[in-house]
Protein backbone atom coordinates (compact mmCIF):
# COMPACT_ATOMS: atom_id res chain seq x y z
CA UNK A 1 0.00 0.00 0.00
CA UNK A 2 2.91 2.36 0.62
CA UNK A 3 3.66 2.51 -3.12
CA UNK A 4 0.03 3.40 -3.83
CA UNK A 5 0.16 6.15 -1.20
CA UNK A 6 3.31 7.49 -2.83
CA UNK A 7 1.52 7.46 -6.19
CA UNK A 8 -1.43 9.31 -4.66
CA UNK A 9 0.87 12.00 -3.24
CA UNK A 10 2.62 12.37 -6.57
CA UNK A 11 -0.61 12.78 -8.48
CA UNK A 12 -2.00 15.26 -5.94
CA UNK A 13 1.20 17.26 -6.39
CA UNK A 14 0.74 17.28 -10.16
CA UNK A 15 -2.89 18.40 -9.77
CA UNK A 16 -1.78 21.18 -7.43
CA UNK A 17 0.75 22.32 -10.02
CA UNK A 18 -1.99 22.48 -12.65
CA UNK A 19 -4.17 24.53 -10.33
CA UNK A 20 -1.35 26.96 -9.55
CA UNK A 21 -0.72 27.44 -13.28
CA UNK A 22 -4.40 28.08 -13.96
CA UNK A 23 -4.73 24.86 -15.94
CA UNK A 24 -7.33 22.94 -13.90
CA UNK A 25 -10.26 21.89 -16.05
CA UNK A 26 -13.81 20.87 -15.23
CA UNK A 27 -16.50 18.85 -16.96
CA UNK A 28 -19.32 21.27 -17.68
CA UNK A 29 -22.44 20.56 -19.76
CA UNK A 30 -23.69 23.01 -22.38
CA UNK A 31 -25.24 26.19 -21.02
CA UNK A 32 -26.30 29.29 -22.90
CA UNK A 33 -25.92 30.29 -26.55
CA UNK A 34 -23.45 28.02 -28.30
CA UNK A 35 -20.21 29.64 -29.43
CA UNK A 36 -18.05 26.74 -28.26
CA UNK A 37 -19.05 23.55 -30.05
CA UNK A 38 -18.08 22.20 -33.47
CA UNK A 39 -21.73 21.76 -34.52
CA UNK A 40 -21.13 24.29 -37.28
CA UNK A 41 -24.15 23.45 -39.45
CA UNK A 42 -26.54 22.67 -36.60
CA UNK A 43 -26.91 19.05 -37.70
CA UNK A 44 -26.56 17.41 -34.28
CA UNK A 45 -30.20 18.19 -33.43
CA UNK A 46 -31.63 18.22 -36.95
CA UNK A 47 -34.98 16.34 -37.18
CA UNK A 48 -33.89 14.28 -40.19
CA UNK A 49 -30.79 12.94 -38.43
CA UNK A 50 -32.76 12.13 -35.27
CA UNK A 51 -35.46 10.38 -37.28
CA UNK A 52 -33.00 8.29 -39.32
CA UNK A 53 -31.05 7.32 -36.22
CA UNK A 54 -34.20 6.32 -34.33
CA UNK A 55 -35.34 4.19 -37.28
CA UNK A 56 -31.97 2.45 -37.39
CA UNK A 57 -32.03 1.78 -33.63
CA UNK A 58 -35.39 0.03 -34.07
CA UNK A 59 -34.04 -2.05 -36.95
CA UNK A 60 -30.42 -2.69 -35.96
CA UNK A 61 -30.28 -2.22 -32.20
CA UNK A 62 -27.96 0.07 -30.26
CA UNK A 63 -24.56 -1.62 -30.49
CA UNK A 64 -22.50 -3.33 -33.18
CA UNK A 65 -21.42 -6.12 -30.74
CA UNK A 66 -17.89 -6.51 -32.10
CA UNK A 67 -15.15 -5.26 -34.40
CA UNK A 68 -15.98 -4.99 -38.07
CA UNK A 69 -13.78 -7.98 -38.83
CA UNK A 70 -15.86 -10.06 -36.41
CA UNK A 71 -19.64 -9.55 -36.17
CA UNK A 72 -19.61 -5.76 -36.17
CA UNK A 73 -19.81 -5.23 -39.94
CA UNK A 74 -23.08 -3.90 -41.41
CA UNK A 75 -24.30 -3.03 -44.89
CA UNK A 76 -24.93 0.49 -43.55
CA UNK A 77 -21.16 0.98 -43.07
CA UNK A 78 -20.24 -0.26 -46.54
CA UNK A 79 -22.91 1.87 -48.23
CA UNK A 80 -21.88 4.93 -46.22
CA UNK A 81 -18.19 4.47 -47.08
CA UNK A 82 -19.00 4.20 -50.78
CA UNK A 83 -21.09 7.35 -50.61
CA UNK A 84 -18.43 9.26 -48.71
CA UNK A 85 -15.70 8.22 -51.14
CA UNK A 86 -17.80 9.61 -54.00
CA UNK A 87 -18.39 12.78 -51.94
CA UNK A 88 -14.61 13.27 -51.60
CA UNK A 89 -13.93 12.24 -55.20
CA UNK A 90 -11.68 9.29 -54.31
CA UNK A 91 -11.79 5.53 -54.77
CA UNK A 92 -12.56 4.36 -51.27
CA UNK A 93 -13.18 5.38 -47.66
CA UNK A 94 -13.01 3.63 -44.29
CA UNK A 95 -15.09 4.62 -41.27
CA UNK A 96 -13.54 4.76 -37.78
CA UNK A 97 -15.15 5.32 -34.38
CA UNK A 98 -13.37 8.67 -33.93
CA UNK A 99 -11.04 11.08 -35.63
CA UNK A 100 -8.42 10.35 -32.99
CA UNK A 101 -8.42 6.65 -33.88
CA UNK A 102 -8.36 7.45 -37.59
CA UNK A 103 -5.27 9.63 -37.27
CA UNK A 104 -3.49 7.10 -35.08
CA UNK A 105 -4.29 4.39 -37.61
CA UNK A 106 -3.06 6.31 -40.63
CA UNK A 107 0.21 7.54 -39.16
CA UNK A 108 1.17 4.41 -37.24
CA UNK A 109 0.22 2.01 -40.04
CA UNK A 110 1.35 3.68 -43.26
CA UNK A 111 4.88 4.45 -42.08
CA UNK A 112 7.86 2.16 -41.62
CA UNK A 113 11.38 2.33 -40.23
CA UNK A 114 13.47 4.67 -42.37
CA UNK A 115 10.51 6.83 -43.44
CA UNK A 116 10.22 10.53 -42.50
CA UNK A 117 7.12 12.43 -41.36
CA UNK A 118 7.04 16.22 -41.72
CA UNK A 119 4.40 17.58 -39.36
CA UNK A 120 3.14 21.15 -38.84
CA UNK A 121 4.01 22.41 -35.37
CA UNK A 122 0.37 23.27 -34.64
CA UNK A 123 -1.17 19.99 -35.72
CA UNK A 124 -3.89 18.50 -33.53
CA UNK A 125 -2.97 16.19 -30.64
CA UNK A 126 -4.29 13.15 -32.50
CA UNK A 127 -1.85 13.82 -35.34
CA UNK A 128 0.98 14.45 -32.88
CA UNK A 129 0.27 11.18 -31.07
CA UNK A 130 0.01 9.30 -34.36
CA UNK A 131 3.42 10.65 -35.35
CA UNK A 132 4.84 9.60 -31.98
CA UNK A 133 3.52 6.05 -32.45
CA UNK A 134 5.03 5.85 -35.91
CA UNK A 135 8.39 4.12 -36.48
CA UNK A 136 9.30 6.93 -38.88
CA UNK A 137 11.67 9.80 -38.08
CA UNK A 138 9.83 12.96 -37.07
CA UNK A 139 10.50 16.45 -38.41
CA UNK A 140 8.39 19.35 -37.11
CA UNK A 141 8.20 22.35 -39.43
CA UNK A 142 7.07 25.92 -38.61
CA UNK A 143 3.36 26.54 -38.85
CA UNK A 144 2.12 26.78 -42.46
CA UNK A 145 5.63 27.65 -43.65
CA UNK A 146 5.89 26.20 -47.14
CA UNK A 147 9.35 27.71 -47.60
CA UNK A 148 10.72 25.95 -44.52
CA UNK A 149 9.11 22.70 -45.61
CA UNK A 150 10.66 23.03 -49.07
CA UNK A 151 14.13 23.43 -47.52
CA UNK A 152 13.64 20.46 -45.21
CA UNK A 153 12.48 18.22 -48.04
CA UNK A 154 15.29 19.37 -50.31
CA UNK A 155 18.00 18.80 -47.71
CA UNK A 156 16.78 15.34 -46.66
CA UNK A 157 18.56 12.60 -48.60
CA UNK A 158 17.18 9.62 -46.66
CA UNK A 159 15.93 6.82 -48.93
CA UNK A 160 12.66 6.14 -47.09
CA UNK A 161 9.17 7.34 -47.98
CA UNK A 162 8.40 10.92 -46.99
CA UNK A 163 5.04 12.03 -45.60
CA UNK A 164 3.75 15.58 -45.06
CA UNK A 165 1.00 15.89 -42.45
CA UNK A 166 -1.20 18.92 -41.88
CA UNK A 167 -4.65 20.06 -40.92
CA UNK A 168 -6.45 21.90 -43.70
CA UNK A 169 -8.22 24.25 -41.27
CA UNK A 170 -6.43 24.52 -37.96
CA UNK A 171 -8.67 23.85 -35.00
CA UNK A 172 -7.30 26.46 -32.58
CA UNK A 173 -6.22 29.27 -34.91
CA UNK A 174 -8.88 29.06 -37.61
CA UNK A 175 -6.35 29.58 -40.39
CA UNK A 176 -5.93 27.49 -43.53
CA UNK A 177 -2.86 25.54 -44.59
CA UNK A 178 -1.25 26.36 -47.97
CA UNK A 179 -2.41 23.06 -49.43
CA UNK A 180 -1.64 23.91 -53.04
CA UNK A 181 1.99 24.69 -52.17
CA UNK A 182 2.28 21.53 -50.08
CA UNK A 183 0.86 19.41 -52.89
CA UNK A 184 3.38 20.85 -55.35
CA UNK A 185 6.24 20.21 -52.90
CA UNK A 186 5.10 16.63 -52.33
CA UNK A 187 4.88 15.99 -56.07
CA UNK A 188 8.37 17.40 -56.62
CA UNK A 189 9.92 15.44 -53.74
CA UNK A 190 8.05 12.14 -53.92
CA UNK A 191 6.26 12.77 -50.62
CA UNK A 192 2.77 11.63 -49.64
CA UNK A 193 0.42 14.37 -48.41
CA UNK A 194 -1.94 13.51 -45.53
CA UNK A 195 -4.58 16.14 -44.76
CA UNK A 196 -6.82 16.28 -41.70
CA UNK A 197 -10.05 17.91 -42.91
CA UNK A 198 -11.79 17.70 -39.51
CA UNK A 199 -12.96 21.33 -39.41
CA UNK A 200 -13.39 21.79 -43.17
CA UNK A 201 -15.44 18.80 -44.33
CA UNK A 202 -19.10 19.61 -44.82
CA UNK A 203 -18.41 23.34 -45.13
CA UNK A 204 -15.93 24.31 -47.84
CA UNK A 205 -16.04 23.71 -51.57
CA UNK A 206 -18.81 23.70 -54.16
CA UNK A 207 -19.95 20.32 -52.87
CA UNK A 208 -18.98 20.94 -49.25
CA UNK A 209 -16.35 18.20 -49.15
CA UNK A 210 -13.58 20.39 -47.73
CA UNK A 211 -10.54 22.47 -48.55
CA UNK A 212 -8.96 19.75 -50.68
CA UNK A 213 -11.88 20.33 -53.04
CA UNK A 214 -11.40 24.10 -52.90
CA UNK A 215 -7.72 23.92 -53.84
CA UNK A 216 -8.19 21.13 -56.37
CA UNK A 217 -5.18 19.16 -55.15
CA UNK A 218 -4.56 15.44 -54.98
CA UNK A 219 -3.79 14.29 -51.44
CA UNK A 220 -2.65 10.78 -50.62
CA UNK A 221 -5.15 10.45 -47.76
CA UNK A 222 -7.60 12.72 -46.01
CA UNK A 223 -9.07 12.24 -42.54
CA UNK A 224 -12.60 13.60 -42.23
CA UNK A 225 -14.21 13.85 -38.82
CA UNK A 226 -17.97 13.22 -38.71
CA UNK A 227 -18.59 14.70 -35.25
CA UNK A 228 -18.21 18.35 -36.21
CA UNK A 229 -20.02 19.90 -39.20
CA UNK A 230 -21.61 16.52 -40.01
CA UNK A 231 -23.14 16.50 -36.54
CA UNK A 232 -22.75 12.85 -35.51
CA UNK A 233 -19.51 11.02 -34.62
CA UNK A 234 -16.69 8.95 -36.07
CA UNK A 235 -14.34 9.74 -38.95
CA UNK A 236 -13.60 8.69 -42.52
CA UNK A 237 -10.19 8.03 -44.00
CA UNK A 238 -10.49 8.60 -47.75
CA UNK A 239 -8.06 7.83 -50.55
CA UNK A 240 -6.92 5.20 -53.05
CA UNK A 241 -8.44 1.73 -52.75
CA UNK A 242 -5.08 0.04 -52.12
CA UNK A 243 -4.32 2.31 -49.16
CA UNK A 244 -7.73 1.74 -47.58
CA UNK A 245 -7.37 -2.01 -48.01
CA UNK A 246 -3.99 -1.82 -46.26
CA UNK A 247 -5.62 -0.07 -43.30
CA UNK A 248 -8.28 -2.77 -43.05
CA UNK A 249 -5.60 -5.45 -42.96
CA UNK A 250 -3.01 -3.73 -40.77
CA UNK A 251 -4.38 -0.80 -38.76
CA UNK A 252 -4.62 -1.83 -35.11
CA UNK A 253 -7.08 0.96 -34.14
CA UNK A 254 -9.45 -0.47 -36.78
CA UNK A 255 -8.85 -4.18 -36.25
CA UNK A 256 -9.11 -4.11 -32.47
CA UNK A 257 -11.89 -1.56 -31.96
CA UNK A 258 -15.56 -2.39 -31.58
CA UNK A 259 -17.39 -1.05 -34.61
CA UNK A 260 -19.46 2.13 -34.16
CA UNK A 261 -23.17 1.70 -33.39
CA UNK A 262 -24.96 1.00 -36.71
CA UNK A 263 -27.44 3.90 -36.20
CA UNK A 264 -24.48 6.29 -36.53
CA UNK A 265 -24.21 5.30 -40.19
CA UNK A 266 -27.88 6.02 -40.80
CA UNK A 267 -27.56 9.48 -39.26
CA UNK A 268 -24.48 10.23 -41.37
CA UNK A 269 -26.33 9.30 -44.54
CA UNK A 270 -28.80 12.01 -43.54
CA UNK A 271 -25.95 14.48 -42.91
CA UNK A 272 -24.53 13.97 -46.37
CA UNK A 273 -28.01 14.39 -47.86
CA UNK A 274 -28.35 17.75 -46.10
CA UNK A 275 -24.88 18.92 -47.17
CA UNK A 276 -25.84 18.13 -50.76
CA UNK A 277 -29.41 19.47 -50.69
CA UNK A 278 -29.07 22.50 -48.39
CA UNK A 279 -25.93 24.41 -49.46
CA UNK A 280 -27.45 27.55 -47.91
CA UNK A 281 -26.37 26.26 -44.51
CA UNK A 282 -22.66 26.43 -45.26
CA UNK A 283 -23.08 29.72 -47.14
CA UNK A 284 -24.86 31.22 -44.15
CA UNK A 285 -22.19 29.87 -41.81
CA UNK A 286 -19.42 31.60 -43.74
CA UNK A 287 -21.45 34.83 -43.96
CA UNK A 288 -21.96 34.79 -40.18
CA UNK A 289 -18.25 34.06 -39.64
CA UNK A 290 -17.19 37.05 -41.74
CA UNK A 291 -19.74 39.19 -39.91
CA UNK A 292 -18.38 38.19 -36.49
CA UNK A 293 -14.78 38.84 -37.57
CA UNK A 294 -15.79 42.34 -38.65
CA UNK A 295 -17.87 43.15 -35.58
CA UNK A 296 -15.13 42.02 -33.19
CA UNK A 297 -12.55 44.24 -34.84
CA UNK A 298 -14.97 47.18 -34.91
CA UNK A 299 -15.55 46.77 -31.17
CA UNK A 300 -11.83 46.83 -30.40
CA UNK A 301 -11.48 43.08 -29.82
CA UNK A 302 -8.54 42.28 -32.06
CA UNK A 303 -8.69 38.93 -33.81
CA UNK A 304 -6.53 37.52 -36.61
CA UNK A 305 -7.52 38.16 -40.19
CA UNK A 306 -9.53 35.33 -41.65
CA UNK A 307 -12.92 34.14 -42.82
CA UNK A 308 -13.29 30.76 -41.14
CA UNK A 309 -15.84 29.77 -38.51
CA UNK A 310 -13.07 29.40 -35.88
CA UNK A 311 -12.00 32.72 -34.36
CA UNK A 312 -9.34 32.87 -31.62
CA UNK A 313 -9.38 35.72 -29.11
CA UNK A 314 -5.87 35.68 -27.66
CA UNK A 315 -5.65 36.61 -23.97
CA UNK A 316 -2.29 35.10 -23.02
CA UNK A 317 -2.78 34.50 -19.30
CA UNK A 318 -4.53 31.27 -18.30
CA UNK A 319 -6.49 32.77 -15.41
CA UNK A 320 -7.54 35.73 -17.51
CA UNK A 321 -8.95 33.43 -20.19
CA UNK A 322 -11.00 31.58 -17.57
CA UNK A 323 -12.21 34.85 -16.05
CA UNK A 324 -13.49 36.19 -19.38
CA UNK A 325 -15.13 32.86 -20.26
CA UNK A 326 -16.88 32.81 -16.88
CA UNK A 327 -18.16 36.35 -17.41
CA UNK A 328 -19.57 35.36 -20.79
CA UNK A 329 -21.29 32.36 -19.23
CA UNK A 330 -22.97 34.71 -16.76
CA UNK A 331 -24.12 36.77 -19.74
CA UNK A 332 -25.69 33.68 -21.32
CA UNK A 333 -23.01 32.64 -23.82
CA UNK A 334 -21.21 29.29 -23.86
CA UNK A 335 -17.56 30.02 -24.67
CA UNK A 336 -14.67 27.99 -23.25
CA UNK A 337 -11.16 29.03 -22.26
CA UNK A 338 -8.47 27.19 -24.23
CA UNK A 339 -5.18 26.76 -22.37
CA UNK A 340 -2.00 24.66 -22.65
CA UNK A 341 -1.46 21.94 -23.71
CA UNK A 342 -4.20 22.57 -26.28
CA UNK A 343 -2.27 25.70 -27.30
CA UNK A 344 1.28 26.91 -26.69
CA UNK A 345 2.22 28.42 -23.32
CA UNK A 346 1.39 32.11 -23.15
CA UNK A 347 -1.31 31.89 -25.83
CA UNK A 348 -4.38 31.08 -23.74
CA UNK A 349 -7.49 32.19 -25.58
CA UNK A 350 -11.17 32.01 -26.16
CA UNK A 351 -11.92 29.81 -29.16
CA UNK A 352 -15.04 31.20 -30.74
CA UNK A 353 -16.81 28.83 -33.10
CA UNK A 354 -19.63 30.14 -35.23
CA UNK A 355 -22.62 28.00 -36.15
CA UNK A 356 -25.36 28.56 -38.66
CA UNK A 357 -28.04 28.99 -35.97
CA UNK A 358 -26.51 32.26 -34.74
CA UNK A 359 -28.25 35.41 -35.99
CA UNK A 360 -26.52 38.74 -36.51
CA UNK A 361 -28.56 40.13 -33.59
CA UNK A 362 -27.22 37.38 -31.31
CA UNK A 363 -23.68 37.98 -32.54
CA UNK A 364 -24.03 41.70 -31.81
CA UNK A 365 -25.14 40.93 -28.25
CA UNK A 366 -22.21 38.55 -27.87
CA UNK A 367 -19.67 41.11 -29.11
CA UNK A 368 -20.97 43.64 -26.59
CA UNK A 369 -20.74 41.08 -23.77
CA UNK A 370 -17.22 40.06 -24.78
CA UNK A 371 -16.00 43.65 -24.99
CA UNK A 372 -17.41 44.33 -21.52
CA UNK A 373 -15.85 41.17 -20.07
CA UNK A 374 -12.44 42.06 -21.49
CA UNK A 375 -12.62 45.57 -20.01
CA UNK A 376 -13.24 44.19 -16.52
CA UNK A 377 -10.19 44.26 -14.20
CA UNK A 378 -8.15 41.07 -14.31
CA UNK A 379 -8.22 38.83 -11.27
CA UNK A 380 -4.68 38.13 -10.07
CA UNK A 381 -3.79 34.49 -10.63
CA UNK A 382 -2.34 32.20 -8.02
CA UNK A 383 1.12 32.73 -9.47
CA UNK A 384 1.06 36.49 -8.70
CA UNK A 385 3.61 37.50 -6.07
Image (cartoon, rainbow, N blue to C red):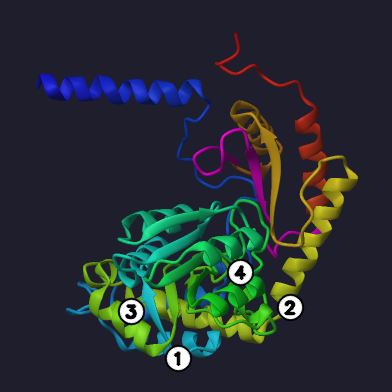
Q: Of the residues under marks 2 and 3, which one precedes in the sequence?
A: 3
Instruction: Tell me whether the residue at label 2 lies in contact with that at label 4, contact meaning CB atoms closer than 8 angstroms.
Output: no
- Identify the image quadrant of residue 354: bottom right
Q: Which residues are magenta?
A: 337-361
Give the spatial CA distance, label 2 vs label 3: 32 Å
Give the spatial CA distance, label 1 vs label 2: 28 Å
Write down the residue under mark 3: 58
Where's residue 253, x and y in %?
28, 66
Q: Is residue 284 left or right of residue 244?
A: right
| Neighbourhood count class around disc 3 (C-alpha, 10 Å): few under 14, some 14–19, many 20 upward | few
Q: Is residue 286 left or right of residue 83?
A: right
Write down the residue under mark 4: 200
Q: Which mark is residue 91?
A: 1
Which of pointers 2 and 3 indicates the residue nearer the eye?
Answer: 2
Question: Element under label 3?
Answer: helix
In the displayed orientation, state which residue is furthest to the right. 298
Q: Of the residues under marks 3 and 1, which one precedes in the sequence?
A: 3
Q: Of the residues under marks 1 and 2, which one precedes in the sequence?
A: 1
Write down the residue under mark 2: 280
Amino acid sequence: MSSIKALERRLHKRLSELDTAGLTRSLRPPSGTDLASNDYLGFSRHPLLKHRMAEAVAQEGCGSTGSRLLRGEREHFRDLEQRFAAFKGVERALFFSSGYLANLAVLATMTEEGDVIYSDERNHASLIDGVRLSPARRVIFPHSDAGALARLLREDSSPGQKFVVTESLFSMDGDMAPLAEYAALCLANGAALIVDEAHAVGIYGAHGSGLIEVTGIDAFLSVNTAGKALGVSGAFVAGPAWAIEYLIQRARPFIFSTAPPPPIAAALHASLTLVESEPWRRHQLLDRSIYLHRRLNESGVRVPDGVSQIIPVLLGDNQRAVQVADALEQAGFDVRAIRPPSVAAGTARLRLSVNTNLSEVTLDRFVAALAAAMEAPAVCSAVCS
